[in-house]
Amino acid sequence: MPHIVLNKTLNLFDFSILFKPIFQKSPLIKIQDMYVDTRGTNALFSTVVIDNSHHEFFIQIMTSKDKTTIRLLPLTDPEKTDLVKQSLVNLCLEIQKYYPDMDVIKSNLWDYLKKNIVS
């Protein structure tokens, strides 16, 4: 399962205020809405990607006291195309835009990440 782990907790309520929909025109990646649970430990992002086919799924962010994980929501489980994987990276880069001190410490998407990564 594609995933990215960041080295700090993310306040999902604060990020929900900062979050703006992510739109990449070609090839199409659209991360539209963010839904945060009442505890502030999980968030879902409705996502659409169109490459050779049309995929609709949710990206899940889970945060704990010392890390934040970005992954595909297993219930929606899209085909793991390059564009689906890139959507996770796009969300990670959006988080790092607002929180530049958050570093990637673990991932199986290294080839898709374009920033300097902490190993």
Image (cartoon, rainbow, N blue to C red):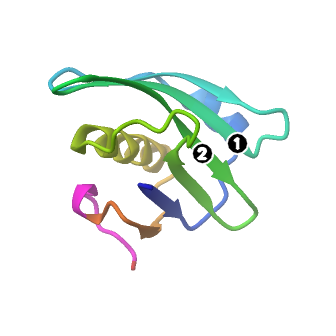
Q: Are marks 1 and 2 in contact (CB under 8 Å)?
A: yes
Asked if residue 111 can be seen in this view, the reply is: yes
Q: Quadrant of residue 2?
A: bottom left
- Is 115 magenta? The answer is yes
Q: Residue furthest right?
A: 39
Q: Position of residue 79 (x, y in %)?
A: 34, 39
The answer to which of marks 1 and 2 sits earlier in the sequence is: 1
Q: Total of numbered circles in the picture?
A: 2
Q: Residue furthest bottom?
A: 119
Amino acid marked by disc 2: Ile
Is residue 59 shown left or right of residue 107? right
Bounds of the magenta span? 111-118
Classed neighbour count for the residue bearing mark 2: other residues with Cα under 10 Å, few (<14), some (14–19), many (≥20): many
Q: Nearer the viewer, residue 8 or 37?
A: 37
- Is 34 magenta? The answer is no
Residue tagged 1: 42
- Residue under the point 46% across and 65% down: 103
- Residue under the point 57% across and 56% down: 69
Residue tagged 2: 61
Q: Position of residue 78 (x, y in %)?
A: 40, 36
- Residue under the point 73% across and 59% down: 64
Relative height, residue 93 to residue 26 (above, below): below
Split into 4 quadrants, where in the image is the C terminus? bottom left
Q: Position of residue 106 (x, y in %)?
A: 46, 70
Relative height, residue 69 to residue 116 (above, below): above
The residues tagged by marks 1 and 2 sit, at their Cα atoms, a distance apart of: 6 Å
Classed neighbour count for the residue bearing mark 1: other residues with Cα under 10 Å, few (<14), some (14–19), many (≥20): some
- Residue under the point 60% across and 45% down: 61
Q: Quadrant of residue 45?
A: top right
Split into 4 quadrants, where in the image is the N terminus? bottom left
